Image (spheres, rainbow, N blue to C red):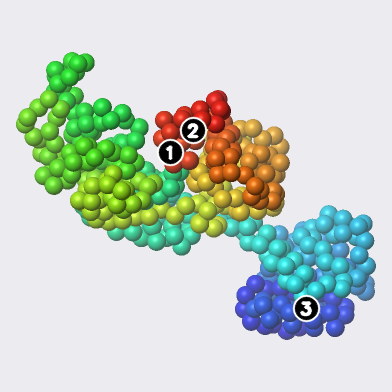
């Protein structure tokens, strides 16, 4: 029995010394730590004393067979994958091996590439299963529902924890659905202003004609319908923080007025000529490239640099690797508790689809999916067949490169709408467009949706 360079630990069990030598040489060459055993008895002795990630075993061996070794591993070592190799390949043998718990089945003779591919597949399944069971980052972010340990998220945690201790303006970048408001809340509630209000404002969701009044307030009689004086969001946030989401949707006229607030620390209510001092920290967020908007002339350069004192970027879910599985675990527990149901589990293939899906709607899309699965799925295990057709289709189809750009856009819009059960507000956020633009596109494609 020998050990090689440190990576994943693999045990190869075969009564053929030649086979052991070939497999050991190939896997060691890829950096794996390889052990060998000539029979099941020696294999079990080694397994009891050495943590292993994968066991590759022959089927036919003297005294105790490879199937018995697989059963022993599956009933005593749940955190170890098993792969079967055999020179007696039959359909019945493959079925029996899979039923016993083998994750892979290779027939002799096999090529070096076939071996390495099967090993990588088995170890990927193990990695996904392990990751789905690991608790995520625990710190200031976790208190506000921000889950994840990926490199991009750890960099983000470090940035916002530093930002929280200052009074500087923060600009938060992130695609729709990445959790920009959660980051803003984490910054505010870990800052010296935590005892005062955090006031979130969706700049893209308020009509332009009302935005000034909503932000700065108005006095009685300022306009038709202004029957009383009303404080705006900035006065409500006095002493605390205001979070301006979708700042890129703000008109140039409103940008000028916001710039004045940043420069002079005062606001002027609609209908009043008397400015009022405010002590408000501004956090802003966007899913757009503000520098590109500056170049296009639709966003003021001076406002951009006023807002962009500290820049925090939230990585999209597709770039967060194992965080998908940590978030899945979190949402399963959360929604199962709300529904008073026993938490569901996922098949290995379902976890693989979750891990490899592109998540155009980011964390919001994953959250919606898990909530729907908890409510709608019967039984205790979620499989790929339980996923929306969009995910099943995207996991298995070949690329169709014969469609026009407009056809691809129309199909994507339909699929996003289907994934959120026709909710146009959620769909527009996932697509990164406003509801008006979405309605126009649906009309042009002759699709009314729900």
Check disc 3 and report the residue beneath it.
23
Q: Residue 442's mark?
A: none
Q: In the structure shown, which secondary structural element does the residue marked by tag 2 occupy?
A: helix
Residue 275 placement: quadrant: top left
CB atoms of marks 1 and 2 within 8 Å:
yes
Alpha-carbon span between mark 3 and mark 2 = 57 Å
| Residue 236 position in % (x across, y down) | 21, 33
Observer-nearest residue: 446 or 77?
446
Check disc 1 and report the residue beneath it.
433
Residue 206 is left or right of residue 93, and the answer is left
Residue 76 is left or right of residue 273, and the answer is right
Q: Residue 441's mark?
A: 2
| Residue 114 position in % (x across, y down) | 77, 69
Disc tally is 3
Alpha-carbon span between mark 1 and mark 3 = 54 Å
Q: In the structure shown, which secondary structural element does the residue marked by tag 3 occupy?
A: helix
Residue 150 is left or right of residue 224, and the answer is right
Choose the circle earlier in sequence order: 3 or 2.
3
């Amino acid at each position: 029995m020998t050990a090689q360079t440190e990576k994943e630990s693999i045990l190869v069990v075969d009564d053929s010394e030649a086979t052991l030598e070939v497999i050991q040489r190939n896997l060691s060459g890829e950096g794996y730590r390889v052990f060998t055993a000539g029979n099941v008895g020696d294999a079990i002795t080694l397994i009891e004393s050495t943590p292993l990630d994968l066991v590759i075993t022959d089927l036919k061996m003297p005294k105790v067979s490879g199937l018995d070794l697989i059963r022993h591993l599956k009933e005593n070592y749940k955190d170890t994958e098993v792969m079967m190799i055999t020179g007696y390949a039959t359909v019945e043998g493959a079925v029996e091996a899979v039923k016993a718990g083998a994750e892979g089945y290779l027939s002799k003779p096999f090529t070096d590439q076939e071996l390495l591919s099967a090993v990588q597949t088995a170890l990927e399944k193990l990695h996904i299963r392990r990751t789905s069971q690991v608790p995520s980052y625990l710190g200031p972010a976790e208190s506000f529902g921000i889950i994840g340990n990926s490199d991009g998220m750890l960099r983000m945690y470090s940035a916002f924890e530093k930002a929280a201790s200052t009074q500087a303006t923060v600009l938060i970048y992130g695609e729709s659905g990445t959790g920009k408001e959660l980051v803003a809340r984490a910054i505010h509630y870990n800052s010296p202003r935590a005892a005062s209000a955090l006031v979130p404002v969706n700049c893209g969701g308020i009509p332009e004609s009302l935005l000034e009044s909503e932000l700065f307030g108005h006095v009685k009689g300022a306009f038709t319908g202004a029957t009383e004086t009303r404080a705006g969001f900035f006065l409500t946030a006095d002493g605390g923080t205001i979070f301006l989401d979708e700042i890129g949707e703000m008109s140039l006229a409103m940008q000028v007025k916001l710039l004045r607030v940043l420069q002079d620390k005062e606001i002027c209510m609609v209908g009043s000529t008397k400015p009022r001092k405010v002590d408000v920290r501004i956090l802003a967020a966007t899913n757009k490239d503000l520098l590109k908007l500056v170049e296009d002339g639709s966003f003021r350069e001076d406002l951009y640099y006023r807002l962009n004192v500290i820049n925090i970027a939230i990585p999209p879910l597709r770039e967060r690797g194992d965080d998908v599985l940590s978030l899945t675990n979190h949402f399963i527990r959360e929604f199962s508790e709300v529904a008073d149901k026993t938490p569901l589990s996922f098949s290995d293939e379902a976890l693989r689809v979750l891990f490899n899906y592109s998540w155009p709607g980011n964390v919001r899309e994953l959250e919606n999916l898990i909530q729907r699965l908890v409510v709608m799925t019967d039984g205790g295990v979620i499989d790929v067949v339980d996923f929306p057709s969009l995910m099943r289709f995207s996991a298995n189809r070949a690329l169709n490169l014969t469609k026009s750009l407009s056809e691809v856009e129309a199909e994507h819009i339909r699929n996003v709408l289907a994934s959120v059960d026709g909710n146009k507000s959620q769909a527009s956020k996932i697509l990164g467009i406003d509801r008006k633009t979405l309605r126009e596109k649906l009309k042009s494609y002759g699709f009314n949706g729900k």
